């Protein structure tokens, strides 16, 4: 059995709305998470939830290429019992995983979120 891998990501406050930039891993300060094997992305949640009126879009990239998967911070609220389930999403490895984040509404602010991965 492989223990889950948790990562906290930070998207620095943007200079303008609708501008995508890579979130950085709070542990390594890198804009990617590198894996040597296939893993499964099980969950994602805002940490903490953005203030009222502030919204973000998160896109999953693999080796810097969009995968077509994206989520909005409103559906990742940690206080919501009806929070959307994002996984499981199998990510074939070895690869680098990136999260491209844009603020879509509200006063410009940094954004943090957590991800949970498990080995397959």
Image: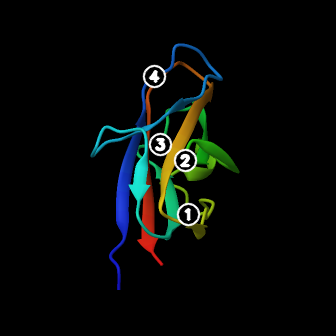
Residues under labels 4 and 3: Cα distance?
15 Å
Q: Check disc 3 and report the residue beneath it.
A: 49
Image coordinates of residue 66 in percent, x first then y, are: 66, 44
The earlier-in-sequence mark between 2 and 1 is 2
Q: Which of the labelled discs sits on residue 33, or is there none?
A: none
The earlier-in-sequence mark between 3 and 1 is 3
Q: In the image, is residue 116 above or below residue 118?
A: above
Secondary structure of the residue carrying numbered label 1: loop
Q: Check disc 4 and report the residue beneath it.
A: 13
Report which quarter residue 57 is drawn in: top right
4 or 1: mark nearer the eye:
4
The earlier-in-sequence mark between 4 and 1 is 4
Q: Number of marks in the image?
A: 4
**Colour convention of the picture:** rainbow
CB contact under 8 Å: marks 3 and 1: no
The earlier-in-sequence mark between 3 and 2 is 3
Secondary structure of the residue carrying numbered label 2: loop
Regarding residue 3, the answer to whether it shows in the image is yes
Report which quarter residue 100 is drawn in: top right
2 or 1: mark nearer the eye:
2
Residues under labels 3 and 2: Cα distance?
28 Å
**Extreme residue toward the top, this view:** 15
Image coordinates of residue 98 in percent, x first then y, are: 51, 45
Q: Check disc 1 and report the residue beneath it.
A: 81
Q: Check disc 2 and report the residue beneath it.
A: 63
Image coordinates of residue 119 in percent, x first then y, are: 43, 74
Quick one: label 2, few (<14), some, or many (20+) residues within 10 Å? Answer: some
CB contact under 8 Å: marks 2 and 4: no
The earlier-in-sequence mark between 2 and 4 is 4
Quick one: label 3, few (<14), some, or many (20+) residues within 10 Å? Answer: some
Residues under labels 4 and 1: Cα distance?
28 Å
CB contact under 8 Å: marks 4 and 1: no
């Amino acid at each position: 059995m492989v223990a889950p891998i948790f990562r906290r990501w930070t998207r620095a406050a943007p200079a303008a709305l609708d501008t995508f930039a890579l979130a950085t891993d709070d542990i390594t300060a890198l804009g990617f998470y590198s894996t040597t094997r296939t893993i499964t992305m099980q969950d994602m949640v805002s940490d903490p939830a953005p203030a009222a009126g502030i919204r973000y879009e998160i896109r999953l990239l693999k080796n810097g290429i969009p995968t077509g998967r994206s989520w909005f911070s409103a559906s990742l609220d940690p206080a919501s019992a009806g929070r959307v389930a994002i996984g499981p999403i199998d990510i074939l490895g070895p690869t680098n995983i990136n999260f491209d984040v844009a603020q879509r509404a509200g006063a410009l602010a940094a954004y943090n979120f957590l991800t949970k991965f498990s080995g397959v």
